[in-house]
Image (cartoon, grey):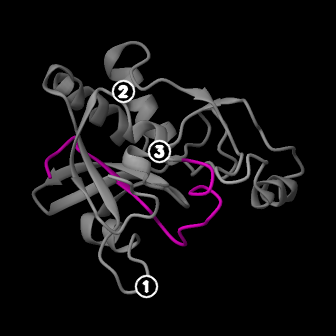
Amino acid sequence: MVTGDLIFTQIGSPDNAISSVTEGYGGARVNHVGMLVETQLGKFVLEAFPPEVRLTHIHVYLNRSRWEGGGHRYIGARLKAQHRDLIEGALAYGMQQRDVPYDARYLPDESALYCSELIVDMFKHASGGVFFPESPMDFRDIATGEVHPAWVDYYGYFGMPVPEGKAGSNPGDMSKDEKLEVYHVSSNLTGLSI
């Protein structure tokens, strides 16, 4: 792992609300993403994770992905060579976002950030335009095709409807982007079919 790598993880239950509505590289149900940052103190991950954007030690970051005593559940991906010149600018912008609150409503505004939104914004800033494209958000259960009941309850807590179709991003879609080269896939990721 080197600075600029994107680390996609599967946190929590394999059937949690995010994993149930997104499908990543090879069918994996990844639900979180951050960027690896190497420092004099070791390897860290720049991430948007409650309560804010922050640097998290790589061991803490990966340990969140353990499930039922198994190993870490993650995908390691690296920008293809022709895009790696964007890493420095993306990282500089991302580091300026530290302490920005975590966006628990997953809305595409800049007052708070969720994990994939942080990465989208970092590369949008570095490239001067769209790099990782956003798409209409889909809160429908992959298995049933219906809006997942957990999302109805979740957004009901905020007194708002599920923002189905609003522009946004998610770790699953990002992990399949053609500008990335996947170099590691944990065999114990839920949904993995490769």
Q: Secondary structure at mark 1?
A: loop
Q: Is residue 8 magenta?
A: yes
Highlighted range, magenta: 1-22
Residue found farthest to the left: 40
- Residue 50, picture quadrant: bottom right
Mark 1, residues whose alpha carbon is within 10 Å: few (<14), some, or many (≥20)? few
Mark closer to the chain start, 1 or 3: 1
Above or below — where is 69 with respect to 50?
below
User: From what the image shows, is residue 163 above or below residue 134?
Assistant: below
**Gap between marks 2 and 1, in whole Å?**
35 Å
Front residue of 143/83: it is 143
- Residue named by callout 1: 68
10 Å crowding of disc 2: few (<14), some (14-19), many (20+) = many
- Disc with the residue nearer the chain's start (2 vs 1): 1
Q: Residue furthest bottom?
A: 69
Task: Please state the horizontal and vertical placement of residue 60, each as a whole percent of the image.
Answer: 32, 71
Amino acid at the residue labelled 3: Gly
Q: Is residue 152 above or below residue 166?
A: below
- Relative side of 135 to 44, left or right: right
Check disc 3 and report the residue beneath it: 172
Q: Which one is nearer the viewer's eye here, 194 or 52?
A: 194
The residue lying at 65 percent from left, 35 percent from top is 137
The disc at residue 123 is 2
**Residue type at tag 1:** Glu
Under circle 2, the secondary element is helix
Q: Marks 3 and 1: in contact by CB < 8 Å? A: no
- At horizontal 46% and vertical 45% (from top left) the residue drawn is 171
Give the overall secondary structure of the magenta segment: loop
Q: Position of residue 115 (x, y in %)?
A: 48, 47
- Judged left or right of residue 99, residue 108 is right
Mark 2 touching mark 1, by CB under 8 A? no
